[in-house]
Amino acid sequence: MGAEREGGARRGPGRAVAYAACGVVLLAGCASMPDSGDLRGVESTPRQDTHVRVLAMPPHEDASSSEIVSGFLEALTSDDPNYEIARKYLTTEASAKWRPLLSTTVLADGPGAEPDRVGGREGSDSLSYTLTGTKVATVDAQQSYSPASGDYSETMHLTRDQKTKQWRIDVPPRGVVMGKSDFQRNYMSVDKYYFATNTTLGTSPHTAAVADPVYVRRNVDPLTEMVRSLLKGPTSRLDRAVRSSFPTGTALKKDDSLTPDDQNRLTVPLNDKAARVGPAKCKEMAAQLLFTLQNLTPTVDEVALRAGGRQLCALTEAGAEDVAARGSAQGAEYLYFLDDKHRLVRLAAAVNDTKPDPVPGALGEGERQLHSVAVSRDEDMAAGVGTDGKELYVGALVAGGPLGDPELTSAGRTPEEGLSAPSWDAQGDLWVADRDPRNPRLLLLKEGVGDPLVVKTPGLQGRIESVRVAADGVRIALVVKQGDKSSLLIGRIERSEDGRAEERSVASVHELRSATPELEEVTAMSWAGDSRLVVVGREQGGVQTMRYVQVDGSTPEGPAPAALSGVKEITASEDAGLPLVGYSEDGIVRLSPGAQWQKVVTDGTAPVYPG
């Protein structure tokens, strides 16, 4: 092909698809190419069934520069484990330097590619292309997802070999770049698990397990990749608040793929760094593996760890639950809400009853009329904010339990400027936001009583409207209002002692990041899993919507909750088997798995599960 055509493109063989017979899509180097003119872009592959494997094709002889560009970009979206086909589009030197695993940039559509007419004269053996698009997200070297926005623009340079006359890329883009639909087909979100530092879950004596979501390639041995990712340690979002039981430097002994046997038992060979761990530590390591691999295929029901030429330990899924506690495994006994007399009442969580009973104790007797409530995770204590939003009361859920003076009083002039709905954490401490515009604060009451601690929130801009602490006690969800916009932010809780004689603990929230950057207004939210929340909000110019979101800002797979009009409050349990419950224009309603919304009671507000 002559040099005068190198700025344009010709139609190549296109994509060949092997349908259900073999479930493979072949990506040829000239797919989506125009017959003439400039190379305008490489279209994102249409969304395929997740079971379809996509294989790239190497460049053909005498491929034009535009065919090299499109072939390389298409190869980035394939299931090639080590990007060996993509490297065939690069020069030898560029291939040696290119690090595709450093980052993945996700664009709204496939990257556009424009040749630089100024940089390469006619007949030149050097040509640049500018890759463009609109950023949606990035995945970093730790496999951690972050929403992104703005324009993407990066230069890719090609050169033509003097001897072979073949075009190759000598300056590739950084990492991998692809469209959103290709990303959804190629990647999947998986939670890897670590242990909260000095945190137990509710009444359980076991350490709380904390989910750390990462993205791995769906069809490139995700099981082995997740084991490697777990051994490398937590992402930077959690590393200051969690620990791993694997000794530093622990890695797989061999690079072989890991596969469970026909009994769903996975043997994991580790290097000598793990050879001297004791039985208790080994079981913690195995529990981390089992929690991490539980939702992957093939299924893993038991893990055996080997190092130093011997088996260290073996652990079943049931045994893992005895080692550490996950929020998603801790079901609630009751659903709680306020009746028409502003008393705290409850229903059995796992049944379809519609006749609530007052809770035992003063809060169920109506001694104080309440506007919002929270129940501790062990369901022994409750906290409620009065109807004027000023006073916070805490009482035990036992018959005859007294209710003393308010534990906290806000100076806010209206209920909207007073105290938010409170939230109990895994350690039995109570969190609440004082929304007084003259002195907005995030407060913590140790065990729900005593002088409140002011929680530091470095870098936070805006006023906290609502608070929900995750079951793991490590992460916190905040709805923050700034101007006319309210956003859902997820942060990491850190605790320390302040060094004074009374050893009062100090809590702070760090690395607050938006989980719903596309929403202009967030009106309600609740934790709905170890790393998932349910959110009610509205996009700019849009109508109210309800959706699930991940803590990293990505959208989990699966359907959104069924639509519900006029949602004012929402609550969910980390246990996905319990119904989603809302307060809407129809009163208290619930959504059981696989069902439609059903009315519970007409006169009721402020539904909550424990937490």
Image: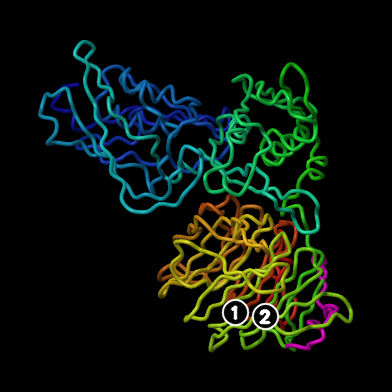
Q: Which residue is disc 1 drawn over?
A: 419
Q: Nearer the viewer, residue 226 or 133?
A: 226
At a point 35% along the width and 27% down the height, the residue shown is: 29
What range is drawn magenta here? Answer: 348-368
Q: Residue furthest top?
A: 163
Which residue: 58% across, 50% down? 557
Q: Residue 247's spot in the image, x, y percent?
A: 65, 31
Residue 356 on the magenta segment: yes
Residue situated in front as seen by the camera: 322 or 98: 322
Q: In the rendering, which numbered label is found on residue 392?
A: 2
Residue 564 lies in quadrant: bottom right
Q: Kindly state the secondary structure of the residue where label 2 is placed.
A: strand
The image quadrant of residue 535 is: bottom right
Residue 40, horizontal then vertical, whole percent: 26, 41
The quadrant where residue 86 appears = top left
Label 1 near label 2: C-beta < 8 Å?
yes
